[in-house]
Image: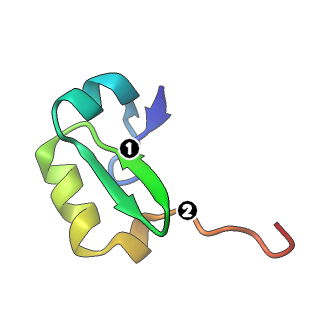
């Protein structure tokens, strides 16, 4: 399970993948609970993507 960064809901990666609810951004895959959350992320991924911390 992983977290949908748009709404905070827990998402099963396999289920999201099978439903086409994933996006790639800066070499990482993100998983979503619904088409609406995926659409929001795709419009502004920099707003939602987890930013690496300095020194990592």
Residue, x 41% and y 43% (percent of image)?
8
User: Which dot marks residue 50?
Assistant: 2
Tell me: residue 33, above or below residue 28.
above
Which residue is drawn at the image coordinates 21% and 73% (left, top)?
43
Q: How many neighbours does mark 1 have within 10 angstroms: few (below 14), some (14-19), or many (20 or more)?
A: many
Q: Position of residue 40 (x, y in %)?
A: 21, 63
Query: Percent from the top left, x then y, of residue 19?
Result: 16, 32
Quarter of the picture containing the C terminus is bottom right
Q: In the rendered view, does 34 fall on the left or right side of 7?
A: left
Nearer the observer, 20 or 44: 20
Residue 12 horizontal side relative to residue 49, left or right: left
Q: Residue at x 37, y 35 (%)?
A: 9
Q: Is the residue marked by circle 2 packed among few (<14), some (14-19), or many (20+) residues within 10 Å?
A: few
> Which SS class for mark 1?
loop
Query: Which one is earlier in the sequence, the residue at label 1 or at label 2?
Result: 1
Q: Which mark is residue 23?
A: none
Q: Which of the 4 image quadrants contains residue 20?
A: top left
Instruction: Label 2, secondary structure: give it.
Output: loop
In this rendering, the count of numbered labels is: 2
Quarter of the rendering containing residue 14: top left
Residue at the far front: name it: 27
Mark 1 lies on residue: 4
- The answer to whether residue 42 is visible is yes
Indicate the position of residue 28 as horizontal and vertical percent values.
Answer: 49, 56
Instruction: Report the residue at 68% width, 67% height from top.
Output: 52
Farthest residue, direction right: 55
């Amino acid at each position: 399970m992983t977290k949908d960064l748009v709404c905070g809901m827990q998402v099963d990666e396999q289920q999201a993948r099978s439903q086409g609810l994933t996006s790639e951004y800066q070499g990482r895959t993100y998983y979503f609970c619904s088409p609406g959350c995926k659409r929001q992320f795709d419009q502004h991924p920099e707003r939602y993507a987890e930013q690496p911390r300095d020194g990592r």
